[in-house]
Image (spheres, grey):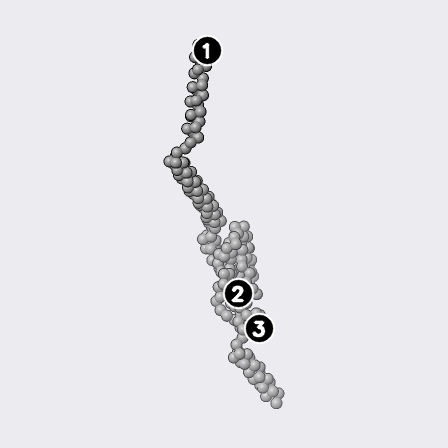
Amino acid sequence: MNDEQEKEEPQETDTEEELEINTEEESPEESENLDASNESLEEENDKYLRLYADFENYKKITARNKEELLKYANKDLITEILTVIDHLELALQHSTESDASNALAEGVNLTLKELRNILEKHGLISIDVLGEPFDPSLHHAMSQVEAEGTDDNTVVKEFRKGYMLKGRVLRAAMVGVSKKQTESGDKESDSDEKNAVTADKKKKT
């Protein structure tokens, strides 16, 4: 029995060597299939990475739009309330000096202050315009005024207040803008001064 086992062992060794040789050697077709599989895998991986990047961008845009929507959700309501503020301010401007009017004006003023405080808590601020350079993104020019001692294109009059809501212009201010005096305007003013001096001389004589 031992002799038979010894004879069988070399046969097993030869078989293992043949298997190793067969596995090490690859046919050209198998090599091409492997390369094609690797290329396909790389393409699918690139598609996945692009799709993942697009999805991440979509999530960021959606979150930003949602934040903007919540941030300015009260915009229309506040815009309507601004009309009420305008009316209260006009009422104060046209109040008389009588005692009854003063008491009413004081009540209106307190109401106006309280309303402004509430709106400021929600991000509303008024736009300062007088003496500022004209900015079309903040101001709506209603007229041009010849003004001495001011730079050209400077806001010199405010017809209606402008407001910003959380860093965004909610309503542009209606303003009057300065312009340089024309030569004809200068000549007219000079002639008026000369006529006034002549009239004074005639009166004295």
Tags 1 and 2 touching, CB below 8 Å = no
- Residue drawn at x 43%, y 40% is 42
Helix, strand or loop at label 1? It is: helix
| Disc 1 target residue | 2
Helix, strand or loop at label 2? It is: loop
| Disc 3 target residue | 148
Which label sits in the foreground, 3 or 2?
Answer: 2
Which label sits in the foreground, 1 or 3?
Answer: 1
- Amino acid tagged 2: Phe
Callout 1: few (<14), some (14-19), or many (20+) C-alpha neighbours within 10 Å?
Answer: few
Relative to the observer, which residue lies in front, 67 or 4?
4
**x and y percentages locating residue 100 in the rendered image:** 54, 60
> Residue lying farthest right?
204
- Residue drawn at x 52%, y 68% is 177
* Left or right of 204 on screen, residue 39: left
Distance CA(mark 3)–CA(mark 2): 17 Å
* Left or right of 11 on screen, residue 196: right
In this rendering, the answer to whether 201 lies above or below 133 is below
Distance CA(mark 1)–CA(mark 3): 127 Å
Relative to the observer, which residue lies in front, 89 or 103?
89
Tags 1 and 3 touching, CB below 8 Å = no
Callout 3: few (<14), some (14-19), or many (20+) C-alpha neighbours within 10 Å?
Answer: few
**x and y percentages locating residue 129 in the rendered image:** 54, 62
Residue 64 visible in the snapshot: yes
Which label sits in the foreground, 1 or 2?
Answer: 1
| Disc 2 target residue | 134
> Residue lying farthest top?
1
- Amino acid tagged 3: Glu
Relative to the observer, which residue lies in front, 8 or 115?
8
**x and y percentages locating residue 127 in the rendered image:** 54, 59
Give the quarter of the figure containing the N terminus.
top left
